[in-house]
Amino acid sequence: QKFVYDFTEGNKDLKDLLGGKGANLAEMTNLGLPVPPGFTITTEACKVYLDSGDAPKELRDEVSAHLDALETKMGKKLGQADNPLLVSVRSGAKFSMPGMMDTVLNIGLSDDSVTGLAGQVGGDERFAWDSYRRLIQMFGKTVLGVDGELFEDALEEAKTAKKVKVDTDLEAADLKKLVKKFKKIVSDEAGRDFPQDPREQMDLAINAVFDSWNTDRAKLYRRQERIPGDLGTAVNVCSMVFGNLGPDSGTGVAFTRDPASGHQGVYGDYLQNAQGEDVVAGIRNTVPLADLESIDKASYDQLMQIMETLETHYKDLCDIEFTIERGQLWMLQTRVGKRTAGAAFRIATQLVDQGLIDEAEALQRVNGAQLAQLMFPRFDEDAKTQLLGRGIAASPGAAVGKAVFDSYTAVKWSRSGEKVILIRRETNPDDLDGMIAAEGILTSRGGKTSHAAVVARGMGKTCVCGAEEIEVDTKRRRLTVGDTVVEEGDVVSIDGSSGKVYLGEVPVVPSPVVEYFEGRMHAGADDADELVEAVHRIMAYADRRRRLRVRANADNAEDALRARRFGAQGIGLCRTEHMFLGERREMVEKLILADTDDEREEALKDLLPLQKQDFIELFEAMDGLPVTVRLLDPPLHEFLPDITELSVRVALAESRKDANENDLRLLQAVHRLHEQNPMLGLRGVRLGLVIPGLFTMQVRAIAEAAAERRNAKGDPRAEIMIPLVGTVQELEIVREEAEAVIAEVQAATGIDLKLALGTMIELPRAAITAGQIAEAAEFFSFGTNDLTQTVWGFSRDDVEASFFTAYLEKGIFGVSPFETIDKDGVGSLVRQAVEAGRKTRPDLKLGVCGEHGGDPESVHFFHEVGLDYVSCSPFRIPVARLEAGRAAA
Ligand code: PEP
Ligand code: MG
């Protein structure tokens, strides 16, 4: 195993081994671009070091051999007193982690070689001593762990003593004194002297770079960016070039095109007579890169040439760091540059137009997360804000409105034209009206799959949940954070993409991409928005390639129509429980309270026409496309009043001796239906089996609605789905009853309704016995929300707010399994069920309707296991289309 590669030995595809920086330095070297010679120590060496606490034994000799070669090439030796070779030691992981890890410049300087350096640069003593003090400062801080402030303070003191403002006004003698002081700081603080042996400097710096992989801030960054923690970093040892040797020197950054807009042009900054760290520190103001043309035309022209070479070679936007040393241009780094979401779409299509990449490659240059980002309205970034608190970014977007603390007020105020933010401790189905009326939802409890989060995402409504610092007091209609009190009616702004909550109004800008999907903005027009144009084209590339169809989770005509505009090819999940809320709650109560068959039938009879009307509207909105209607799923208590509230009400009434009969019956029912684990209780198919007539009423409503649509010359394509099935027997019983009802309706109307019957696979037992279940099901739809809950034994309503943070921190998983499908566990069951199901019934239709259906990474998985479609909330449809296309490209 080889641990060290010369820049001439690597290439851009060796990022795993050489890190991004090392691989690209090698690539540029081999392209014949001016890169200062050097070598890269591999990530493998780092891994050995991190695992064992020691660098691999072979490393020292390999480094010596490469150093020898470098010294020969450069004609000088590391730290040689009269003519020193100086090197930089820089970190460089596979994925860029800007500013997270360590770098040490000017390695090789010592009390002896500092004068040698002055000689090399024409006797510039000031420069030599300044370089030396920089080395001690950087080395002291990053390698020896000395508090950087101590050096900064000493530097400030030196400037004050001399009555000057900027570093450059310090002269050689001042800097020489400063070096002495810096060395003393090192000896005092680090318990050792600053090493004078250049090789020791280098070896210690290399180890420090290895160690910097595991600093707290690096770990935190990796967690946030989902970078695996075991990759390690490479170390680049590169001969130093100096941008601070006078006005004919300098340093800069450049982009081959604008990372914000994607436009080609001259983008970047340049700082004369400076080193890279001066740019970062913002010590002096940079000038636009274009100004370099008048400062040093030859270097500028050469740089433009190189930028073109790089873009054509990488076929992408590159960013570049360069230094000019006395008129000689050097490339210090390049990489495929980060860009905004909008620029990613524009650049991808621009590169297609330039013939540099094809459509399939263009799809790999963008992703669903970027598209999602472009679809949400945003807060104006330049606005002044007052942060109130921070919660979980549950459903993206930017919402502003008056604080209200109950649904009733939300509806009332919004009817009178007010924009409101509904603020609750947590939400429940009772809050639905308020949630619909509100611009956004803020809760102080609950995680990403809490009721508030799931429903808000479904509606495409901004939601911040679990903002724990915020105390919600619904009784007094206000919230408090520390000393700040927000009363009902005070304006708040919530950012569902960052989880931030602000006091007051933050200005919002709408998304042109949503305007486009909604049909309010068009591609192809003369003045079309460039971004919209690019999104339009990329979506076409994706639609042409994808195999997965994309359906919507929608349960009313309005959502269905929007989903269609967004490209939905049907409805994959219509949750009928949403049709049982609001004014119909009373009917549902009647159904639950029914003591006799007559009472029950009466209640069902009242519900039937309402259900039927819902379906007629839905089938009309989705005419010609499949609509999967799921029969009632949630535990019944969700339709009844809260047990505590009701108990209090009844107790109070009893003490006044005016308890009403209905409340008493209700309370009995609530007690009777109360369950310790309602999600594992009487719900789904179990309801259908124990409440006679419930499912058949729903089936009748579906069948009659379909018949009516057919009579109106429509093309309804209903599919009836049974939830929470665990065994084929459950399905068989329900199926038989349903078929009888359908046959009745067909006989009565004389129409062959062609209604498909299928089931959700959302329990482990269903997945395991999928082969049997397929005998009674014409389709499966994977309910990966419940399947994740039951496979992991995680309560989907609780865990994200309780211990998921700890799990994420400990790296047990990098992302919640409720968000991205757990391929090894839940996913493996899905895969088995797909195979077993298809074995029984080769034409079995397969889809997924859990939240994962709109998650980019999960969509790729569903493509791979061979599902026919994914179903997700209307707003995620474009993302699912894009990712399905990317998966197939
Ligand atoms: C599921 O469990 O994945 C599902 C889609 O059903 P619900 O979220 O309604 O339980
Ligand atoms: Mg479910």
Image (cartoon, rainbow, N blue to C red):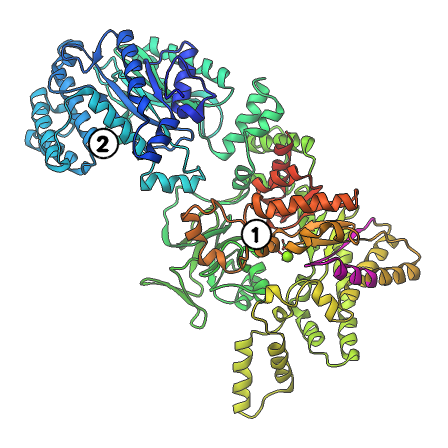
> For the magenta stretch, what is the residue range?
715-737
Q: Is 140 placed left or right of 682 in the picture?
A: left
Question: Label 2's element?
Answer: helix
Rendered residue at 55%/26% (across/down): 348
- The answer to whether residue 438 is visible is no
- Type of amino acid under label 2: Val
Q: Give the left or right position of residue 451, taking residue 389 as reference.
A: right
Question: Who is closer to the viewer here, 616 or 879?
Answer: 879
Quarter containing the N terminus: top left
Q: Residues within 10 Å of mark 2 (few under 14, many from 20)?
A: many
The mark found on residue 702 in the picture is none
For label 2, the residue is 143
Mark 2 vs mark 1: which is more N-terminal? 2
User: Residue 111: within the magenta?
Assistant: no
Q: Position of residue 515 (x, y in %)?
A: 60, 41
Q: Horizontal and vertical percent for residue 784?
A: 62, 51
Residue 726 painted magenta: yes
Dots 2, 1 in contact, CB < 8 A: no
Q: Compared with residue 577, is residue 509 higher up or lower down, i.e. above or below?
A: above
Q: Is residue 226 visible?
A: yes
Query: Measuring 69% from the left and 72% from the top, which residue is drawn there?
Result: 588
Residue 560 image point, x, y percent: 69, 50
Of residues 674 and 40, which is closer to you in this image? 40
- What secondary structure is marked by label 1? helix
- Farthest residue in the bottom direction? 657
Q: Give residue 96's quadrant in the image.
A: top left
Q: Amino acid at mark 1?
A: Arg
Apparent side of residue 349 relative to residue 728 in the rendered image (left or right): left
The residue carrying mark 1 is 457
Residue 418 versus residue 113 in the image, above or below? below
